[in-house]
Image (cartoon, rainbow, N blue to C red):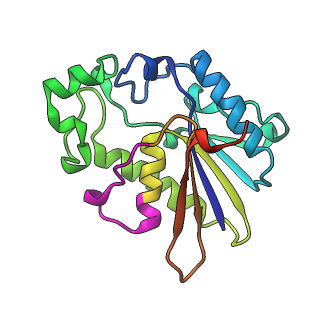
Amino acid sequence: MELYLLRHGASTANERRLVCGAEDFPLSQTGLAQAARVCRHLEQIPFTRIFTSSLSRARNTVAPLVKEADRIRVEQELVELNTGSYSHLTLDVLWERDPRYQRPWLQPDLRYPGGECFSEMVSRITGWYDRESRNWEPDETVLIVGHEGTLRSILLRLLGGELSAYPDFPIGNCDLLHATIVPGHTVTYRHIPLTSLAD
C-alpha cells in the first residue's frame, strides 16, 4: 500500500508564527499558491481514498483536486493539537513562558489551558488511523491531508515507536511524506519537500 501524508499550505497563523493549534486560521495567499502547486503533482497519482482534517486550511489545500471532490472525506479527528487559550500566542512567547511546550512529546501529559495534552492528540489521530486503515486493501493508494501533528503522529504509528520517539524534523507547508507499507516488512518512507516538486 502507498500512503501519502500532506501538510496543509501556509496559513495566516503560520505567517504570524502563532501557536494556532486547532483554531481555524485560513490559508494565506502564499498557502493558496502552494496548494495549487502540490495539487498539480497529486492529480497525477491515482488515489483510492482521500481524507482531510476538518480545518479549512487542510480542506482548502486539496480543493484544487476538483475531480476528486466527491471522494474527499472530512475527518474531525485529524485536526491539530488543541492548544486552547494559548492558540493566539506567538511561538516565541509560549516557549519563553514555558519551554516544555517546545517539545511536548517529552512531557506528553502537559495540558494546554482549555485544550488537550500531547498524548491525547496522538491517541486521537492514531486511533483514527488504526480504525480506518483496517478497511484498506494492500493495493490502495491513500492520501491524508492534515497538520504537522497529524503527519508526525501517523508516522510514529507506522514506525512502531514510543511517544518519546515522536518524529522531530521540520515538515514544511505542503510537504509530503510518502510511505510504502508491505505486510511483514519494515515501513519505508521519504520526505518530499514542496520545493522539490516541478512547477
At 80% across and 41% down in the image, what residue appears? 68
The answer to which image quadrant residue 69 occupies is top right
Frontmost residue, 197 versus 44? 197
Is 111 above or below relative to 87? below
**Location of residue 74 in the rendering, given as x and y in whole percent from the top left corner:** 63, 39
Quadrant housing residue 14? top left
Q: As drawn, which residue projects farthest toward the right?
A: 67
Q: What is the quadrant of residue 195 in the picture?
A: top right
Q: Position of residue 56 (x, y in %)?
A: 59, 25
Most extreme residue toward the bottom is: 184
Quadrant occupied by the N terminus: bottom right
Give the x, y percent position of residue 29.
61, 16
In the image, 66: left or right of 134?
Answer: right
- Relative to 112, residue 2 above or below: below
From this view, report whether residue 130 is shown above or below residue 175. Answer: below
Is 32 magenta? The answer is no
Q: Does residue 164 show up magenta in the picture?
A: yes
Image position, residue 145 (x, y; %) = 59, 42
Q: Residue at x 43, y 36 (%)?
A: 80
In the picture shown, does residue 90 fall above or below 168?
Answer: above
- Left or right, 195 with respect to 106, comes to right
Looking at the rendered structure, the number of numbered marks drawn on it comes to: 0
Q: Residue at x 72, y 64 (%)?
A: 140
Q: Which residues are magenta?
A: 156-170
> Which residue is depicted at the point 82% across and 34% down?
66
Of residues 113 and 50, the one drawn nearer to the viewer in this rendering: 50
Q: Quadrant of the C terminus?
A: top right
